[in-house]
Amino acid sequence: MTTSKPAALAVLLALAGGGGAVLTGAPAAVDRAMFGGSPARNMVSAETGLPSDWDVKTGRNVKWWADVGSQAYAGPVVAGGKVFVGTNNDGLRNPKLPNDRGVVMSFAAAGGDFLWQMTHEKLASGRVNDWPQQGVCSTPYVEGNRLFYTSNRATLVSLDAEGFKDGNAGPVADEKNQGPTDADVVWEYDLMAELDVFPHNLAVSSPLVVDGILYATTGNGVDEGHVNIPAPDAPSFVAIEAATGKLVWESNLPGDKILHGTWSNPAYGVVKGRPQVVFPGGDGWVYSFEPKTGKLLWKFDANPKDSKWVLGGRGTRNNIIATPVIFEDRVYIGVGHDPEHGEGREIE
């Protein structure tokens, strides 16, 4: 447990709730945790007795805290007695792995002890594909003893949630780092090498797994000039076998219609008896697919038909950064812009 806090670092807090519960929703046979709490991404918790305020200096309502990196956009999620969070390398847990990196850290949920970390070096192409200091921005999906996320290098990664504590799991047995605080890689799928994806600024999708299939967006987008799309035939949406890391299906929608990037997250639901996985597209449309085959079920333009995209947020057309929520046979989605390119326009 950490006892001093450098001002440059973000802090992971564990709050002392009256109910003592960690996960949202009813207990499951297999422990699961993900961005949004469920595959429908409906971020509503059924827990009660949770603290509504706390004080780090006095420790009021704080069970423990621990340093991560200087920026931590991913997570935390809690499963199997562990906390998982995506961050950058400014916390420098291992001096042998220096410099700017994407990092996923694991802590003990009970006391905050640091357990292990996975680090990813930055892409040589630089900020057009891998923005500095952002770290891993994908909130992991955890199911049982497996952890899944998108790295800053646009790879989909499966880790053993136990690290090397239970041996070296999966087909990957030649990890560069195999110390007691290093991560055990089960498989890694390179979206750039395998599918020619060109992530704009960063690949960030928080994946989900349903019936053994992992769903994620790829980050495919424009180049540094913000006009040309280097890989219009590369997929924006993918489905991967969660156990093996093998590609199940891909979709290159919306192809050359991408406005900026593809950064949002998929959601899954059964609407009027029909299972579907819903992806926000980089063109401002929402796409729904048959989960096991990738067959397009429907699509919807989340902008008025007369809207126009103008670089820098000066137009009337929005793209989609938000994650869809599926609730009671309806899909809810917000539209907007990368805040560095304007605030977007309200839609009435």
Image (cartoon, rainbow, N blue to C red):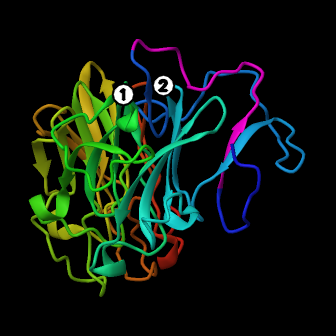
Residue with the mark numbered 1: 145
Q: Which residue is drawn at 45% across and 63% down?
A: 135
Task: Based on the picture, tell me whether residue 195 belongs to the magenta stretch.
Answer: no
Depicted 58 relative to depicted 30: above or below: below
Depicted 275 relative to depicted 124: above or below: above
Q: Which amino acid does label 2 sit on?
A: Gly
Image location of residue 245, percent across then percent down: 16, 41
Q: Is residue 161 visible?
A: no
Depicted 100 relative to depicted 264: above or below: below
Q: Quadrant of residue 137?
A: bottom left
Q: What element carries label 2?
A: loop
Residue 142 appears left or right of 186: right
Q: What residue type is labelled 1?
A: Asn
Mark 2–mark 1 Cα distance, whole angstroms, equals 8 Å
Which label sits on residue 80? 2
Residue 97 appears left or right of 69: left
Kindly report the secondary structure that dominates the magenta region of the rendered protein: loop
Name the outermost residue toward the top.
29
Tell me where the magenta segment starts and ends, as one range: 11-29
